[in-house]
Image: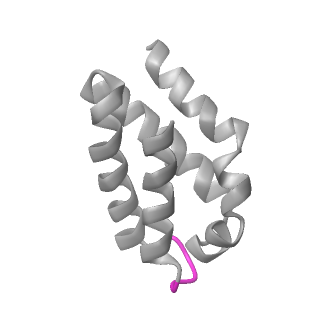
Amino acid sequence: MGRTLIFILIIFSFTACKGSWDGEDKKAFYDDCLETATTWAGSPDKAKSYCDCVMDKMMKKFPSETDALEHIDSVLNDPDIYSCKVDAVKK
């Protein structure tokens, strides 16, 4: 989970100045997520499942990267986002 937390912090630090999840931001987040998740997930399919889940939950909970960054403590401790990892590993 430590690498995941670092990954989320890095992503939000790069996107904090923007006000919405535009296509470029979503692609950057997703690509970085896949790169990180591939190191622990055990397969590309599990990494994709995890990143799909995280992206969906982040966009539903936070209308913009700025909003997500302002609530980073809740993101890092969010059981819904953590469940993405648990569910991906089970598959």
Describe residue 44's horizontal placement relative to residue 6 as left or right: left
Where residue 77 sits: x, y (%)? 70, 45
Residue 18 on the magenta span = yes
Q: Residue furthest top?
A: 90
Q: Could you tell me which residue is drawn at 45 percent across and 34 percent down?
A: 50
Q: Nearer the viewer, residue 27 or 4?
A: 4
Q: Could you tell me which residue is drawn at 43 percent across and 64 percent down?
A: 10
Residue 65 higher or lower than 38, as above or below: below
Residue 25 higher or lower than 44, as above or below: below
Q: Residue furthest front?
A: 2
- Majority secondary structure in the magenta region: loop
Residue 10 on the magenta span = no
Quadrant in the picture for residue 3: top left
Describe residue 61's horizontal placement relative to residue 36 as left or right: right
Q: Could you tell me which residue is drawn at 71 percent across and 36 percent down?
A: 79
Residue 9 higher or lower than 20, as above or below: above
Describe residue 55's horizontal placement relative to residue 23 as left or right: right
Where residue 58 sits: x, y (%)? 60, 54
Quadrant in the picture for residue 87: top right
In magenta, the rendered stretch is: 17-21
Where residue 37 sits: x, y (%)? 35, 38
Quadrant in the picture for residue 74: bottom right
Q: Nearer the viewer, residue 25 or 71?
A: 71
Residue 3 higher or lower than 64, as above or below: above
Q: Could you tell me which residue is drawn at 61 percent across and 77 percent down?
A: 66
Q: Quadrant of the C terminus?
A: top left
